[in-house]
Amino acid sequence: MTHLELMKDVNFVGYIDFEVRNFHGYSTHKGSSYNAYIVKSGNKTVLIDTVKRPYFEYYLKNIKDVCDPKEIDYLIINHVEMDHSGSFPLLLKHLPNAEIIASTRGVDNLRLHFHEEVESEVFDKIRAVKEGDTLDIGNGKKFAFVPIPMIHWPDSMVSFMIDENGKNILFSNDAFGQHLATSMRWDDENDISEIMWEAEKYYANILLHLSGLIAKVLPKVGALPIDIICPSHGVCWRTHIGKIVEAYKKWSAGEIDGKSVLIVYDTMWGSTEKIAKELFKEISHRGITVKRFRLTNADYSDVITEAMKAKAILVGSPTLNNGLYPLVAEYLSYQRGLKPMNKIGMAFGSYGWGGGAVKEIIKELKTTGIDVLDEKIELKFVPRPEDLDFKSIIDKLVEKMG
Ligand code: FEO
């Protein structure tokens, strides 16, 4: 047994990235990992996925700690995004005997990514698999390939290994992942609330806008007799599989627990913040959960995670140059791309003379598909105490929340 063994015949050969703090715009406060696995059956050896290119040498060393790379019979590429395929061109010369397997779209995307470094005939020889295709590696172990387009890219697939003599493992790639660096590879070896928060943040920042497609694919994945899920980021699931699959069902359906409100805003000279604080007070006095984030001090990857969970999103901005304050514009653009579902929205803000920010917020919220309250709050310069009476507007918000 090596330090890389997850269980008999299954090894982790990826890279745990404690350094990364930004993953294509998503804040990864706790790092991430690029998981790759080697499965042996006695007859055959299978390598699943590669890692981000800067970590190729670590990955190759891990592979060599598990087996002679020449013994690898198959390389499965579940997804072509560079965090999983980046080492592909560097790896090829070490795997002279491996057949490469990818989805049909995966073959196309490998070619489109690595045509400058890899000979065309390598792509020509890749086995393109579709739903229902299998790979028998002997001794009761058999892979079934299931395309899961748009979780996370059109080329994505999962590889499900049935083991007649052991555990059935779903190598799920991006699905069920978390951006979390930890030396402990299993869910039950870590704090489950931390893992679930990171899984939720991952869903909100990466998969949320794909929820319609995910909801369609989930029953197919959920029907598999899964004992273990090995994703491509974060820890593997063996104890809390039901919890993460149920969470994906809930998130992809846009289900929300009860009434809760998110207030997100920025402020220039404090007036918009006065409104935000008064809204917070009025809502929390009614016993409704409410969270308040000033964007100057908040991270929008965290804020969008809260937005996914909230029933109502109240967005505030002062007017700057007849439009939105920059961080509010940035957040709204991020939110528009991710399309949180089943939300009620409301706009508020302050202005000096012409206004404009509140109108822009309403436009952005509507474009995002949020059901915007007819009422809005738009106050000139510094609000007077009597301007800050929001009882009736919050009554309407609460009524709309149901
Ligand atoms: Fe972790 Fe879509 O790559």
Image (tube, grey):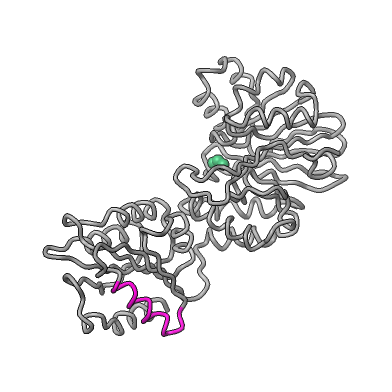
Q: Nearer the viewer, residue 10 or 219?
A: 10
Q: Is residue 276 magenta?
A: yes
Vertical relation: 19 (above or below) 382: above
Residue 93, relative to residue 253: is it above or below?
A: above
Where does residue 335 sit, x and y in percent of width and height? 39, 55
Residue 76 x %, y %: 67, 32
Q: Is residue 317 left or right of residue 5?
A: left
Residue 274, quarter of picture: bottom left
Specify whether residue 146 is in view: no
Toward the left, the furthest residue is 353
Give the residue drawn at x 61%, y 26%. 88
Quadrant in which residue 192 is drawn: bottom right
Specify whether residue 211 is painted magenta: no
Q: Dividing the image into four equal quarters, which quarter contains ligand 1?
A: top right
Question: Residue 294 at what x, y percent from top left?
Answer: 37, 63
Q: Residue at x 74, y 19 (%)?
A: 97
Q: What is the quadrant of residue 41 in the picture?
A: top right
Measured as percent of width and height from the top left, residue 94 is found at 70, 20
Magenta: main secondary structure: helix
Does the image show residue 153? yes
**Magenta span of residues:** 274-288
Measuring 11% from the left and 65% from the top, which residue is drawn there? 353
Q: Quadrant of the C terminus?
A: bottom left
Which quarter of the figure is the N terminus placed in?
Answer: top right
Residue farthest to the front, as pictured:
269
Q: How many marks?
A: 0
Q: Is residue 70 above or below residue 7?
A: above
